[in-house]
Image: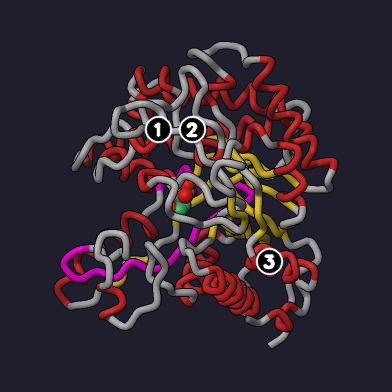
Amino acid sequence: MKYNFPDDFIWGTSTSFFQIEDALHPSSFHDWKGLKGKDGTCLEHNIKHDHHITEDAALIASLGNSYRMSMDWSRLQSEPGAQFSISAVQHYRTLLGLLKDAGLHNMVVLHHFANPNWFSKLGGWLNPDSPALFCNYVKQMIDHFGDLVDLWNTINEPYVYAFFSNITGYFPPYSSARMDKFRRSLSNLASSHRAAYEMIKMHPVYSAAGAGFTKNATLFHPETIFSKPITALLNSLFIHNVNKLFSVGDFVAINYYGRVPFTWHPILEINSPGVLDKMGRQHDMVWEYFPQGLEDVLELFYKKYARPLIITEHGCCTLNDAFRKKSIFDHLDAINRASLKGVQVSGYYHWSTFDNYELHLGSTYPYGLIQIEPGTYKRILKPSALYYQEIIRQSKLYVNCKV
Ligand code: BGC
């Protein structure tokens, strides 16, 4: 089969600030348990991206025509309604400027999981004022960075964020089984998305940028007749019944990693090691490997939203880099199949640029195309990075790159 990605297809890689920056800013997200050592002190970050922006911008530019990143809200805004810190603005303008000079289109995520401590202390996303606090931040984001941003990604995976913060207790404020809080924070996130979208579109100078939110697109699959009701409920909660306020946007973005099979409980390699092997399923360190699912969700989301789709994250958590290459190939193949059926897919960002700090799991879950040498912080492009560069170069006929 010949692949036919359009000339203006967005190719890139994706990160989030707290997974790659040195976590040492005052009033930042130090309450995040995942970033603390056993004694409660903040862990030394393993990438220190914010100390290597010139080198990193050049590497990022070699991996596509676009880059998706987020910024540290707490570093920019030290308290509710405060004017942005000039040095923080300069830091991020330098990074975005380097990327622009290298010819990239910048996509900036306005909320990627981490909140400033002052925001958390005010109740976080459960606070009825949270949309207003967020909008104050967004207004300054557009004013300060609008000339360097092509695409705004308002909220990353609001359903995952609200679920992990209020149902499973993985994320701050670590509440468990609080459906009421889950709903409340989702509703505040949805109003914030809508308000942010309107602010971008009404901005007197920088209204031309595209904007949309990112939805996680994990499918839950019943393995037995008994798991049908629970998977139906989860698919309805996570995929089908998305708050209407999120449907406002120029594009809909999705993050896709794999499928979650369900017997009595979800089977992720992380919580049931070896079970996926016994079931004869391919997997990485977390997910069942299921490229077909990407084609399925692209079709489903295109039908639902009828607007261009962007894959803002797809990746593979593995030490086996040949498997990462295969994963890239198979998932681009799935995108291609969906496109041939008429689904408009405008871009693909690989998660992630670097091996980074994986949320509540720590730094030993590698998703990166670039490895960081411990101690020296030397950046080493993995074979999968070279493979991805080749695909981008030959995007019209990347069948030649088949691994
Ligand atoms: C998140 C990333 C995370 C990735 C892999 C996505 O849900 O947006 O922050 O690292 O999944 O787990």
Quadrant position of residue 101 = top right
- Relative placement, left or right, of 183 versus 399 is left
Query: Is the residue under label 3 in contact with that under label 2 (CB below 8 Å)?
Result: no
Under circle 2, the secondary element is helix
Going by the numbered disc 1, the residue's amino acid type is Asn
Q: Is residue 234 left or right of residue 113?
A: left
| Nearer to the camera, 169 or 272 | 272
Q: Nearer the viewer, residue 135 or 241?
A: 135
Amino acid on which the number 3 mark rests in the picture? Tyr
Rendered location of residue 269, percent (x, y): 32, 65
**Residue tagged 2:** 192
The CA distance from mark 2 to mark 3 is 35 Å
| Disc 1/disc 3 C-alpha distance (Å) | 38 Å
Mark 1 or 3, which is nearer the eye?
3
Q: In the rendered view, would you say 309 is above or below 28?
A: below
Q: Residue at x 47, y 44 (%)?
A: 357
Asked whether 114 falls inside the magenta stretch, the response is no
Q: Residues within 10 Å of mark 1 (few under 14, many from 20)?
A: many
Question: Tag 1, which secondary structure?
Answer: helix
Q: Position of residue 330 (x, y in %)?
A: 56, 77
Residues in magenta, as a range: 243-265
**How far from the left and from the top, in percent, is residue 232?**
26, 65
What residue does disc 1 label?
188
Q: Is the residue under label 1 in contact with that under label 2 (CB below 8 Å)?
A: yes
Q: Which residue is mark 3?
A: 388
Residue lying farthest to the front in this orientation: 375
Q: Amino acid at mark 2?
A: Ser
Q: In terms of depth relative to the viewer, which is nearer, 264 or 299?
A: 264
Judge whether residue 258 is colored magenta.
yes
